[in-house]
Image: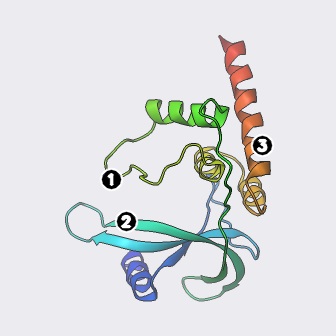
Amino acid sequence: MVFSNTIREALHAGGFWLVMQDSDGQVAVSGGDIVTYAHITNIDWLSGTQIQVDVDLKAWGCIEDQVQFNPPRLCAKIIPLWTTNQKLPENDILFVRLKQWLAEYGYQSPLMVDTSADFRDPCWLCWRWLELLPLPLKIKQRLLKRTNPKLCLRYLKIIIHQSDLYTQVLR
């Protein structure tokens, strides 16, 4: 019932804010945390065993404060997404490892394919890696609060290089 009401309210409002939650159940709902604004593109209420909601992620936001309702609501201000004209080479380690990960583990349903995927775009690559890696919520938030993806790229490359070194030791 709560889920259905939330979806109806999001439809009426034109969208809703998505917050990050880590594997320990911690959520990013403090003032200044980064959230994502989503627009509902389709709802399938009846075809499957569960309601299926398709969303289009439109923008980032910065939480201004949390209003106490039941359930809680938050107020966020839209902020610009990272943009850059830079393109990474196809031999960039983040590009290569993400392609490898998708080939080995990625779920490749026609509905799940991101047609806007640009593996050479540093912003897009950072967002995908931050979605995949089990990093602490505070680190993800700190990286996303930067004005561009440079620090995130450097941080992710260090993690991938360290992972590669560790994997070679195990062999």
Q: Position of residue 122 (x, y in %)?
A: 65, 48
Q: Amino acid at mark 2?
A: Asp
Q: Nearer the viewer, residue 130 or 122?
A: 122
SS category of the residue bearing label 3 = helix
The three-letter amino acid code for the residue at tag 3 is Tyr
Q: Residue furthest left?
A: 47
Q: Closer to the camera, 18 or 78? A: 78
The part of the image, by quadrant, that contains residue 41 is bottom left
Name the kind of residue labelled 1 in the image.
Answer: Leu
First of labels 2, 1 by sequence position = 2
**Residue 100 rendering spot, x and y as whole percentages:** 52, 30
Q: Which mark is residue 111?
A: 1
- Quadrant into which the C terminus falls: top right
- Who's the residue at 32% across and 70% down the image? 42
Residue 54 is labelled as 2
Residue under the image location 37 percent in, 65 percent down: 54
To which residue does mark 3 refer?
155
